[in-house]
Image (cartoon, rainbow, N blue to C red):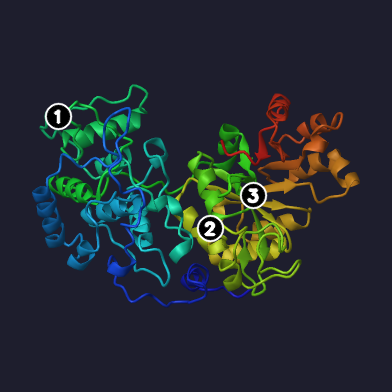
Amino acid sequence: MKRWNRGRLRAFCMAALCAGLLCGCAPGIVPARDMDMGADPLAGVAIDPDTGVRDTVESLCSKEEIRQAAAALVEAGVLRREELEAIPLDAPASRAMLIRLAVGAIGAEVPARERFETWYAPFVKAGYAAGLFVDSMADMSFVPTDGFRMGERGYADMDRPITRYDAAAILARTLPAGEYGKTASADLEAELPEPLRKKVELAVSAGLLLPLEDGGFYGESRISNGQALVCVYQAMKCGARRPDITVPEKAPPVGRLLQQQRKVIHAAGRIAGQSGREITYTNSGEALVNAYRAGNRVIELDFMQTADGRLACIHKWNSSYAPQITDGVPITLAQWLEADLLGELTPLCLESLADFMRQHPDLYVVTDVKDDNIGAVEIIAAVCPDLLDRFVVQIYSDREYEAVRQAGISNIIYTLYNLSGAEKADTDHWVEFAVEYSLVGYAYPLEWFKMDGYNEAMKETGVPLFVHTVNGREEMEMCYDAGITAIYTDHTA
């Protein structure tokens, strides 16, 4: 198979086949017209009836402090003047905006922005590379994402107002170790997770985010863009720098991870649509982020080849997924990336998935290829050879094993669902195969698990066993009690 240049492939997917065409912006430069940071409709001055605190807490920052901070950030090169002029200082600061400022404050290298890319995407990528979000699940309420797709299809969470808690968690990572001499302290919620509590205390002691007059921190309140400028400027005065954190280079062994988490998220998991109804089998960007944010680190995705030989994350080519699809007829990658996936979700392809995996080095992806399994593995090996140890490939027949190993994949699950009943029932063969070949484990349907004696016979293989798809609580417990290592499930929580 032809080995494609990885940069070209990424451009094909992430820029809708506009390979190599950039938006004309140098790294770190955001056209003012693209910085949509003041459009949030929640920018009012509503009062919380329980606390009496404004939704946007900026009362501790005077206009003069904001002016001084803004001028200093422009002088330091964190912001260009035209960027600053595009920022509505009284509006709530978005998560993306705070990240953009923090990345600038630590002097992280920001990659060039690709055509149609969300304005904040390069800063999120730079933040990951600098270690700004390592272990973010422990102290942040969201997982930073560059949006998978460009323009209007960026992931909406990044446009939401950032809370004081999340601002503290990010900015505290930029501070050098040591005492800051501030006497302020804050009354924090008793149930606050310890990692977040330490970040808030550090941010308060350094004067980045001060408590209100009554001593309360009010961490769920929002900060304005003006206050964000002051917070970041204060962090710079305290010596903001890249975190003293080593970005993990490898995920833990997948076998150990499966024993700990005890589940594989099926087709990226169940997600709530805009109408409130729960949707499965989406294999979408939003579902992937939702599953990861919930703490899941082994996620299964479906793959099918596009008309031009790329990999799309889709269960089947069916018009029920998007009106651009004719039943049973593959479309091109460009068409897939522009498709209206269930009217509201973001289509994923191999290249955008690979980017997410590089940003989240503790994630494993289990493949479920619906057409040419070996062809898909060869595409994966060509597109992202650096990630082969974090793809767990499911094989569907004995003959696929050697081809998958030769492609560089070491983590293999033998899934039995495509086999005939007689083949599934031949447990002696599965014992022999497991002796001869290294496997992560066997996977088989729930109805076969329930067959009298089948699971006990499969235990003789001596390898981990997985059952799919299990969504009922009683069935989950039944599987675990019977010695099943992990289940495939649509539930992410």
Work out whether 165 lies above or below 378. Answer: above
Work out whether 20 lies above or below 63. Answer: below
Mark nearer the N terminus (3 vs 2): 3
Compared across the picture, whether 475 is left or right of 10 comes to right
**Which residue: 38% across, 60% down?**
121
Q: CA distance from mark 1 to mark 3?
A: 48 Å
Q: Amino acid at mark 3?
A: Ala
- Viewer-nearest of labels 2 and 1? 1
Circle number at residue 267: 3
- Provide residue 352's location: percent of width, then percent of height: 51, 61
The quarter of the rendered structure image containing the C terminus is top right
Q: Amino acid at mark 2?
A: Leu
Give yes or no for contact between labels 2 and 1 (Cβ–Cβ under 8 Å).
no
Q: Amino acid at mark 1?
A: Ala
The answer to which of 51 and 25 lies nearer the viewer is 51
Compared across the picture, whether 216 is left or right of 312 comes to left
**Which residue: 74% across, 45% down?**
436
10 Å crowding of disc 1: few (<14), some (14-19), many (20+):
some
Can I make out residue 426 in this image? no
10 Å crowding of disc 2: few (<14), some (14-19), many (20+):
some
Q: Secondary structure at mark 2?
A: helix
Q: Secondary structure at mark 1?
A: loop
Task: Please name the residue that numbered disc 2 is placed on.
Answer: 353
Compared across the picture, whether 7 is left or right of 313 comes to left
Q: CA distance from mark 2 to mark 1?
A: 44 Å
